[in-house]
Image: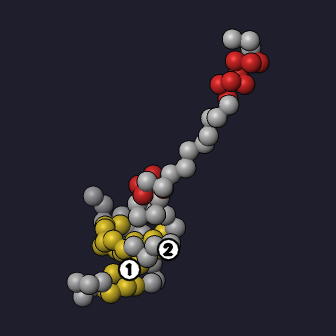
Amino acid sequence: MKQGIHPEYRKVVFMDSTTEFKFITGSTRYSNETITMEDGNEYPLIRVDVSSDSHPFYTGRQKFASADGRIERFNKKYQR
């Protein structure tokens, strides 16, 4: 790999803004904000709006569109 052209890969903390859930992972994202975690180390902090802790698909609180009456309306419209 060429030197000086790749972003720095380091451990960062991603924090879900809605649930305050935090996790450490590797990233090239840059942040001026830092946070001290339970292990005593200080990491750059990246705030995210949605994570697996708050996304409806992962939490099981997903809403499905109701299809009530659609089949009946289709059949009535096309006389089936």
- Residue 17 tag number: 2
Mark 2 closeness class: few <14, some 14–19, many ≥20 residues within 10 Å: some
Q: Amino acid at mark 2?
A: Ser
Rendered location of residue 42, percent (x, y): 31, 86
Which one is earlier in the sequence, the residue at label 1 or at label 2? 2
Q: Is residue 56 above or below residue 66?
A: below
Q: Give the residue furthest to the left.
A: 39
Q: Is residue 45 above or below residue 25?
A: below
Q: CA distance from mark 1 to mark 2?
A: 15 Å
Specify whether residue 46 is in view.
Answer: no
- Residue 44 tag number: 1
Q: Amino acid at mark 1?
A: Pro
Rendered location of residue 17, percent (x, y): 49, 74
Q: Is residue 41 above or below residue 15?
A: below
Mark 1 closeness class: few <14, some 14–19, many ≥20 residues within 10 Å: some
- Residue sitting at 55 percent across and 49 percent down? 63
Q: How many marks?
A: 2
In the image, taking residue 19 as reference, residue 42 lies left or right, namely: left
